[in-house]
Amino acid sequence: MTAEKTVSAIPDFRFTPSVDQVGVEERASRFTKRSIKTASKVSGLKLALNMIDLTTLEGKDTEGKVKQLCYKAQHLHDAYPGLPTVAAICVYPSMVSVAKKALGDSGVKVASVATAFPSGQAPRDVKIRDTKFAVNNGADEVDMVISRGRFLQGDYNFVFDEIAAIKEACGDARLKVILETGELGTYDKVRKASDIAMYAGADFIKTSTGKISPAATIPVTLVMLEAIRDFYYKTGKMIAMKPAGGISKSKLALHYLVMLKETLGDAWMNNHWFRFGASSLANDLLMQLMKDKTGVYQSGNYFSLD
Amino acid sequence: MATRKNNTLKLSFETGWKYDPAPESKSSAKIDPRYELFINGKFEKPLSKKYFNTINPATEEKLSEVADANVADVNKAVKAARNAYDKVWKKMPPKERAKYIYRIARMIQERAREFSVIETLDGGKPIRESRDVDIPLVANHFFYYAGWADKLEYAFPNRTASPLGVAGQIIPWNFPLLMAAWKIAPALATGNTVVLKPAETTPLTALKLAEIIQEADLPPGVVNIITGAGATGAAIVNHPDINKIAFTGSTDVGKLIQRAVAGTNKKVTLELGGKAANIIFDDAPIDQAVEGIINGIFFNQGHVCCAGSRLFVQESVYKEVIRKLKDRLETLIVGDPMDKNTDVGAINSKQQLSNIHKYLKIGQQEGAEMYQSSCPLPSKGFFCRPTLFTGVSQSHRISQEEIFGPVLAIQSFRTDDEVIEKANNTPFGLSAGVWTDKGSKIFNLTTKMRAGVIWANTYNKFDPTSPFGGYKESGYGREGGLHGLSAYVNLT
C-alpha cells in the first residue's frame, strides 16, 4: 500500500451520497415486519449471542468486575449446553491486561476503547498514546471516537487524518471507529462520517459510545450498512459494523440481523463482520433461548448479572 | 488501500440463516360455501340460478361459489337502489347519513384481521400488504367521507350540491375492498345509492362488506352488491335507470363503457390503465430511490394501475442503480401470500399470469435483456418471479403496453428535456415518480409531466384526502379528497 494509491482512492467528502430521511426510515421499518419463528429464531438468537461485545465502561470498574465479566463471556449460561461464547469483551485501556489474562486462549477477543473515550476531547498525541497503551497491553481491537466537533465544523481532513493516525498506532489490532451518531444530527452526516472513517482505514464502523442518547437505531445502522456496501463495491474491501447502545431485547437484535442479511448478505453474517455493543442483551437472549427449550419464561434471577 | 474496480464483486443472499414459515392464521376468517346477491338489504338467490367459483390463486383451491347476476338481477338491484334513493336516502338529513358511514368504518376496523385474511386468500396479495395497507385505507376512506357528508356546502361554497341518484359501480380485482370503499364512501356521503359489482375473481371481501352493511342497519337498497363477470357489468352500464357510472379497470373496457354511455345522460368517471415513468436523477438519494422503484413495481405483484413500470435512470448512475436493483431483487421473498414474510404474493388469476408470460416472451423477442430473481416458486398456484428488462427502447411493446405484473422496463437518459419527452410519450397518464435531491428539478418536472399523480422521492402513497385519477387513456374524473365528491353531485 503506497501513499499515492491511497490518495487516489479518496473521494471528495463534500459530495457523499445523500440520504432521504423518510425513505430510509420506511425501509428500516420493513425489517421489523419480518416474523422470525421456530428454528430460525433459535439460530438467530445464538448468532446474536456470538456477536456480542460484552461491555463494561464505567468509572467504578474494578479488576474483579472485569474478571467476572470475562468468565461470563466464556460461560454464558451453563444450564444450556452448547452455547457459543460472546465475540469480545470491551473495557477501558487500564483493564486490558486483566481481561487478556482472564480470557486466555478462549478465542474471545479483548476490545479496548481509546482516544479519550467517550468525548474524544484530547490532543492527538494523547489519543495516540492512549491507543498504544491499549495495544501494548494486548488489545485485539481498539474502539476510537471521532472528533465530532471538528466533523460538524466541516473539518473533514482533520477527522480523516486523526483516524488514519490512530489506525497506524493500532498496528495489527482491528480499529473500530465510533461516529457517535446521536451527536451528528442527520442521516446525511452519518453517511459522510461513515465514508470518511472507511477511507481513512477503519476496520469497523460503530454507531455510538453508549453514553449519548439516542444510541444505535435501525435506520442509522442501515445508513452505515449501505455505506459499507457501496465501499465494498468500490474497493473490494469488506468493513465490519457494530451498532452499540440501546439494543437490549432479543426481538430488536433479530431485526438487526434481518437488516444485515438483507443489506449485506451472507459474508457479513458472523462476528468477524458484525457485532452488537451491548451488555444487557446477552441475558435477554439467554432468557429467550431457555424459553424455547423449556416452554416457559424463567425469572431474571436465573441469569447471572456480571 | 488500492482502488480495485472489480466488476466481479457480488453480494450473496443465499444465506444459511433462512426465515421459517410464519403463516397468518385463517381462523379469524369465516367464508361461507356459497354467497347470494346482496339486494335491498338481504342476501337473495339469483334469478339466473347460476353460480361461479372463486379460487385462492396461491393454491388453486376453491374458496366459495358466488351468484352470477343476469340482466333480471341487475334490474332488481337497480330498482331497489332507486326506491331507496327516492324514499329514504336523499331525504335523510346529511348528518344522519354520516352516522351510517362512520359506523361502517368502525365495523371494518373491528374486523380488520378477518378482512385482511380474506383479501389475501381470495386475491393472492401478501398478508403484510392487506393488513398494513389495504384494510386500514379502506376504513380511512369511510371515515374521511363520513366527515364530508354534512359539510357539502363548505366543499362547494355558494353552490348547492344535490345527489345524482343511482350510481352503478364496477371495480377491479387488484384492490378489491379498497376500490369498493373508494366508490361507495363518496357516493353515500353525497346522498346517492349504489349498485356495486366486484371483479369476478375477487368478490369475497365485497360480500363480507355487505354483511357489515346489513349489521350496520343501513336502510335496505342504499347499497346493493351483485356479483358476476363482464355481462353483469354490461347490464349495469346499459341500465336506463342508472345516473352515474364509476369504473376502475382496463382501458379496453373503459372504451367500451364510453361508447355505451354516449348519448345518454349518465355521468361517468373512468380510472383506467397506466404505464408510469419513475425517473431517477444522478443527485437522487440512490438507496432510497432503489427501494422506491422496488415498491413502485413489485407492490401487489405489480397489479397496480399506477405502478412505476417504466424506469428512467440518468446515465451517470445507471450501472450503480441496476446493480442495486439486482441485489434488492434477490432479497424479495416470493411465495405463500399468507406468510407474514412474503413480499410478492400470487398473480391474481391464471389468465393474468399467461398475459404476463406473453409479455416476458415479447420483451425477449424485442431484444431487451431479461433479469429475474433466483428465488424458488411454489409448485402450485400462479406465481411470477420479479423481472427487470434492460436495453429497452420507447418502441418496445414492453415499454408501451400495460403488463400489470411484476415486470419493470428500464431505460437510461441524459438530459431533463429528454426524459420529460420520453416519459410523456405514452397513451397513458395516470402517475409518475421523480427522484432527486433538488427541489427546483422536482417542480420543473411535475409541471411538464402529463400525469394525474406525481410522487417526489417516494412512490405508491395513498391517502383518502388526496385526489387520484388520470390524463389521456388513463381515464378521467378524480377519486379521493374534495375532488372525489364532485363526481357524485349536481351543482346548481
Image: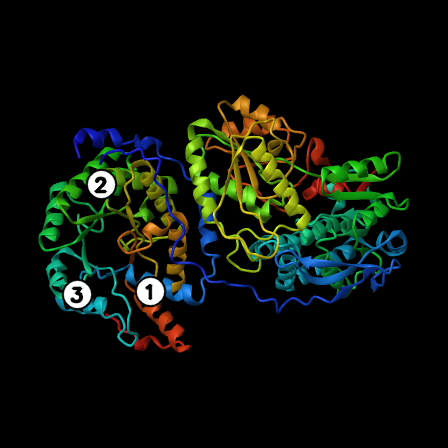
The answer to whether residue B295 shows anywhere in this view is yes
Q: Foreground residue, A120 or B232?
A: B232
Residue at the spot x=13%, y=64% of the render? A104
- Asked which secondary structure carries label 1, the reply is helix
* Within-10-Å neighbours for mark 2: few <14, some 14–19, many 20+: many
Measure how far apart labels 3 and 1 are at the Cα level. Answer: 23 Å
Image location (x, y in percent) of residue B318: 45, 31
Can you say which quadrant of the picture contains the C terminus of chain B? top right
Label annotation for residue A46: 1
Give the number of the disc on residue A201. 2
Q: Is residue B285 visible?
A: no
Q: Earlier in the sequence, mark 3 or mark 1?
A: 1
Q: What amino acid is labelled 3 in the image?
A: Val
Q: Which residue is mark 3?
A: A66
Chain for disc number 2:
A
How many residues crowd around disc 3 within 10 Å: few (fewer than 14), some, or many (20 or more)?
Answer: many
Which label sits in the foreground, 2 or 3?
2
Of the numbered discs 2 and 3, the one sitting upstream in the chain is 3
Q: Check the residue under mark 1 and report the chain it is in.
A: A
Q: Is residue B340 left or right of residue A1?
A: right
Residue type, numbered disc 1: Lys
Residue drawn at the location 65% of the way across and 66% of the way down: B29
What numbered label is drawn on residue A24? none
10 Å neighbourhood of mark 1: few (<14), some, or many (≥20)? some
Percent x, y of residue A96: 13, 58
Query: Considering only vertical position in the picture, is B43 above or below B367?
Result: below
Q: What is the three-letter code of the residue carrying label 2?
A: Gly
What's the residue at 58%, 51% (across, down)? B383
